[in-house]
Amino acid sequence: MSETERQSPFDVAYVARLARLKLGEDECARLQAQLEDILAYVETLNEVDVSGIEPMTQALETQNVMRADVSAPGLDHAAVMANAPERRLGLFIVPRIIE
C-alpha cells in the first residue's frame, strides 16, 4: 500500500463533522496533509533516545511567589454604592443581557 493510499489515523473530515465545521474538499485535503506532516514529525521525535534525560515541567527553575493570606478591610459600602448608576436594596442594578 502506498503512502497516499494508507489510511490516516486522523480523519479531518470526520472531526470537522463532529465539530459542526463546514470545510470544503480543498480545505479538508490541505488540513489533512498538514496534520499528516505534523504526525510524521511527532513519530520522528518518538525515535529520539531520551533514556538519560530527567523529565521536567519547566525549562528554567521556577518558584511560586506567595504572599501571606492576611485579611484586610474591604471597601466602604456607602462609598461604593455612591458610584452605582442604579441601586436597589443596597445592590447594584445592571441591565439584563440574557433574553
Image: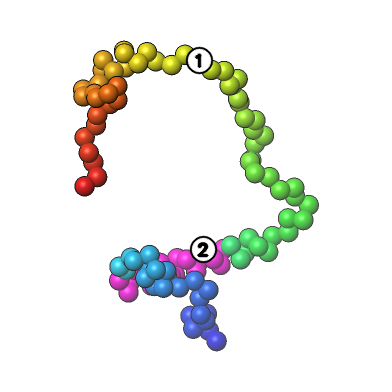
Displayed quadrant of residue 78: top left
Q: Which residues are magenta?
A: 24-41
Residue 72: give its label. 1
Amino acid found under the numbered disc labelled 2: Ile
Residue displayed at 27% across by 23% down: 89
Amino acid found under the numbered disc labelled 1: Ala
Image coordinates for residue 24, horizontal then vertical, percent: 30, 71
Query: Furthest-front residue in view?
Result: 89
Image coordinates for residue 68, horizontal then vertical, percent: 60, 20
Displayed quadrant of residue 58: top right
User: SS at mark 1?
Assistant: loop
Q: Main secondary structure of the magenta part?
A: helix
Query: Furthest-right residue in view?
Result: 52
Image coordinates for residue 92, horizontal then vertical, percent: 28, 26
| Residue 25 appears in the picture as rendered | yes
User: SS at mark 2?
Assistant: helix
Displayed quadrant of residue 70: top right
Which of the image's four quarters has the N terminus? bottom right
Up-down relation of residue 5 to residue 94 (above or below): below
Residue displayed at 61% across by 26% down: 65
Q: Are marks 1 and 2 in contact (CB under 8 Å)?
A: no
Up-down relation of residue 84 to residue 54 (above or below): above
Question: 22 or 47, which is in the foreground?
Answer: 22
Residue 38: give its label. 2
CA separation, marks 1 and 2?
A: 52 Å
| Front tag of 1 and 2 | 1
Q: Residues within 10 Å of mark 2 (few under 14, many from 20)?
A: few
Q: Residues within 10 Å of mark 1 (few under 14, many from 20)?
A: few
